[in-house]
Amino acid sequence: MAASTSAVSAPDVERTDLSRWRLNSHEGGGRHVWTYLSHEEAQTAEPQRDEEKYWLGIEVGAPSLPRATTPLDAARNGFAFYRRIQARDGHWAGDYGGPLFLMPGLVIGMYATGTPIPREWSIEMRRYLRSKCNEDGGWGLHIAGGSTVFGTATNYVTCRILGMAADEPVMVKARGLLHKLGGATGAPAWGKLWLAILGVYDWEGLHPVPPELWLLPDAIPIHPWRWWPHTRMVYLPMGYLWAKRFSVPLNPFLQQLREELYTQPYDTINWFRQRNNVAQVDIWAPHTRTLEALMGVLAGYEMLGPVAALREAGIRRAYEMVVMEDENTGYQGIGPVNKMLNYLVRWDVEGPDSDVMRQHREKLKDFMWMGPEGMRMTGTNGSQLWDTSFIAQALVDSGLVDDAENKAACARVLHWLDECQIRENPRHHKAAYRFATKGAWPFSTKEQGYTVSDCTAEGMKAVIMLQKDAGLDEQISEARLRDSVDLLLTMQNKSGGFASYETINGPKILEWINPAEVFGDIMIEYDYPECTTSVVTGLLKFKQMSDYRAADIDRCVKAAFKYIMAAQRPDGSWFGSWAVCFTYAMMFALESLHLSGQSCGNSAAVRRACHFLLSKQRADGGWGEAFESCVVGTYVQAKTSQVVQTSWAIIALLHAGSEDHEAIRRGVRLIMSRQQADGQWRDEDTVGVFNRNCSISYPNYVHSFTIWALGKAHRQIKGW
Ligand code: LAN
């Protein structure tokens, strides 16, 4: 399970000088670009700011604060530290790493297109990969996961491209494990894809991804526009690359890799038979009979020879859609996977010296995060809006917004939220099957530009709380908030629930043809309790300040509550999809029930929820839930209590109006006991998750939710 970190401190591992890294997040808009100064530049450059030091793991040297005796004092100390690491433009930056299947796409994509990899990146990516290698020598799908063929095969070739020799002990061990797992032939589809692009896996070993799918009439229930945006945006460029059988031409290095990756000579592998060969350790969502039957039909079509005109039209259509996606997202893509696949498509068509590739190259930087153990590729270009809107709400809810020393920080937050709101629909809107964006807040930056239901709601809540509740000078007019409300009201599903990026547009049976064996529930959108709750609370917050569309809001909220109640499990819990796990979802669900007037005093559902949460409290007063909860679907205790989950549980119990104040106090005491003298809390276990099976880091949660829980507890419970 646990990744070994021994390599980080090994003296012989090459590393850069951490004091020469700078984070240029001052350009506005929240863009993150880490740059490495030359020796000369470092002599005259501004000294590193606390923000940079903090994220690089260099001691910030913040002074010790007077010991907190009440939760509010502890929250105050917490923010005294946290505001030191606020970005100059007002948001909070952070490491959004965790998945280990992203950097291979970057490195293979750069290699395939001859894009030079900066030396400092290469050194630090190697250091990162060494540090995330499991004890058995392999890599997992993510930093908290056991070794898989996907993780090991793709990160193995990544290390090799980055210059690590085949006979280095780390490589020898990784190769040994890979062979023990059956070799790279058993990589899941997305692993096969990257290896095929590199020219070290035969395209014959991949199931077809015909771009002709994009030529189907929109009304067909399986048309890709109906898929979850991440999935359709990954399969779009994949279709192009598959149809073209895009591969790096064979060279002696790749020849050598072909020898290293398999347990038998490359030329003797029966590639066609590998299509359904996926190593057992990798499988989360096994192929269904329906998928295999469909793939059989597609394989037959390929054997007969596809209709050339159709194939050409499919390729052209996929390319046009890739162009629209690039232009809609400032060359970021919706995420790092389609970013790199689009990168290859555009290079293939437009060539390396085009303006398009110049822009694409520039935006590679947005996904590269430098941290204490090296450089990683992140799950999106950051989590800027998400983190900033939580701390904004925490500051208002706790009253810390009124402290004189926090005024400037709060004003900067509001200014950033103002800049981050998306004011127009996408440039290519209907043509690119994009959901409307006017009035939205995104998850990361305005430039990335995708609407997310809960991000829009949390962004809107943060603005209303800062402007109305805390009385900061208005930056965002009511008209602009009305745009957000209009947008949210169009995002509701028939069930009453809300999904992530858009409404549910496809049938559930699409999941039967989920071809990505490593992730579950990725084919279509689903209702999520977390997203639904955020939207409900956002709309109700808005209703407190305006009559605009009050009847529509009421109708929407009523239907949403029906969904939230129906999603509660008999044991009183809610299952969370975007962080670990029940504790997270319960915080959201109980917030919305609170707003509907339900509390322990008058609602059996809320009492059941509290009972569930209280039954999970640990002897030390804290809560700690393991990542495995998301995978197995039942509550699994972590090894130790975690401050973030303890904060979520406290916030949930406070929303519920739990009368067990002693339980809340014990939780509060645990959080306070873990606070450092300078006010900060140290990072603990990874709490983010996606697609049921992959962990992702939210290192800002340890600041925002602790401050929030302490401030809220102080306000709601008397006699500290
Ligand atoms: C995210 C991160 C944020 C998350 C919340 C806002 C928390 C959630 O409530 C809605 C869904 C959303 C926006 C979300 C969706 C999936 C993402 C984008 C991620 C978990 C971050 C990384 C992940 C993305 C799919 C990673 C790339 C992998 C692929 C399978 C393409």
Image (spheres, rainbow, N blue to C red):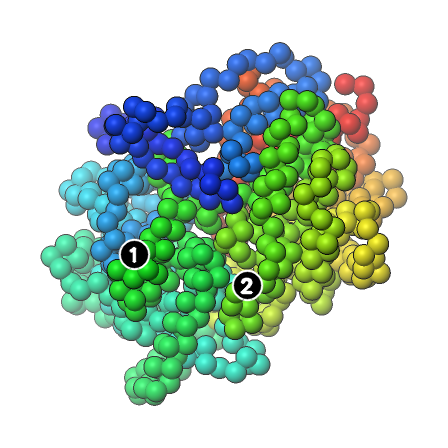
Q: Where is residue 493 shown, x and y percent of the image?
A: 69, 65
Residue on which disc 2 sits:
426
Q: Is ligand 1 within 8 Å of the beta carbon of the residue shown at mark 2?
A: no
Residue on which disc 1 sits:
109
Q: Is ligand 1 within 8 Å of the beta carbon of the residue shown at mark 1?
A: no
Q: How far apart are marks 2 and 1 (CA)?
A: 27 Å
Q: Which residue is drawn at 69% across and 29% down?
A: 401
Q: Where is residue 193 shown, x and y percent of the image?
A: 33, 63
Q: Where is residue 712 shown, x and y percent of the image?
A: 73, 30
Q: Where is residue 428 shown, x and y percent of the image?
A: 51, 68
Quadrant for the N terminus, please.
top left
Residue 416 image-quadrant placement: top right
With respect to residue 62, does 419 lie above or below? below
Which of discs 2 and 1 lies nearer the camera? The answer is 2
Residue with the most extreme right position:
602
Q: Which residue is drawn at 45% across and 77% down?
A: 214
Locate residue 92 relative to residue 249 in the image: left or right: right
Locate residue 251 relative to residue 55 in the image: left or right: left
Residue with the most extreme left position:
252
Q: Which residue is drawn at 38% across and 33% down?
A: 22
Q: What amino acid is at disc 1? A: Gly
Q: Which residue is drawn at 26% across and 43% down?
A: 118
Q: What amino acid is at disc 2? A: Pro
Residue 392 numbered tag = none
